[in-house]
Image (tube, rainbow, N blue to C red):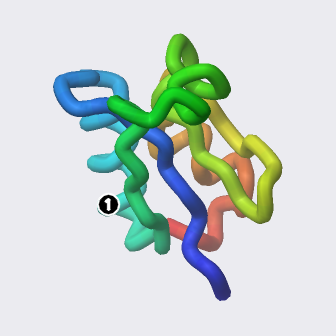
Amino acid sequence: MTPDLLYSRVGCHLCEDAEAALDALNWPYTRTEIGGDLELERLYGWHVPVLVRGGKVLLKGVITRSRLLELTGPDRS
């Protein structure tokens, strides 16, 4: 399975919280910094963190353990 992409920005507390939630669930993801990339800033600048799978946005903004579990069901815990 290809890891999901987490678009985030350095210094973003919501992004740090999202990474902690993903890590707690052993969720496969790759963090992508949007700072300095004009296209990513245009797409996601005010919405980070943004979790994407196969080009489809799964979650954005506040990404918590409970919101992640809603995507997969309780068996993921």
Q: Quadrant of residue 12?
A: top left
Query: How far across and down, in percent of the image, does residue 3 sit?
Result: 56, 74
- Residue lying at 48% horizontally and 73% vertically, measured from the top left: 28
40 and 71: which is toward the camera? 40
User: Which residue is outermost to the bottom?
Assistant: 1
Residue at the top extreme, as displayed: 46
Other-residue count near label 1 (Cα within 10 Å), few / some / many at <14 / 14–19 / ≥20: few
In the rendered structure, the answer to whether residue 9 lies left or right of residue 77 reads: left
User: Which residue is pictured at 60% across the width and 32% down the height?
Assistant: 39
Q: Is residue 74 above or below residue 57?
A: below
Q: Where residue 76 sits in the image (x, y, percent)?
A: 58, 70
Of 33 and 16, which appears nearest the observer?
33
Whether residue 6 sits left or right of residue 21 in the image: it is right
> Is the residue 49 above or below the residue 19 in the image?
above
Residue located beneath label 1 in the image:
24
For the point 61% across and 29% down, the residue is 60
Question: Please, what secondary structure does the residue beneath circle 1 have?
Answer: helix
Task: Look at the picture and state if 47 lies above or below 5.
Answer: above
- Residue lying farthest to the left in this orientation: 11
- Amino acid under label 1? Ala
Q: Is residue 37 above or below residue 24?
A: above
Location of the N terminus by quadrant is bottom right
x, y (%) of residue 66? 54, 41
Q: Considering depth in this image, is 35 or 24 the residue closer to the camera?
A: 35
Q: Could you tell whether 49 is left or right of 33 in the image?
A: right
- Left of 13 or right of it: where is 48? right
User: Residue 36 placed where, x, y %?
Assistant: 35, 31
Count of all numbered marks drawn on residues in the image: 1
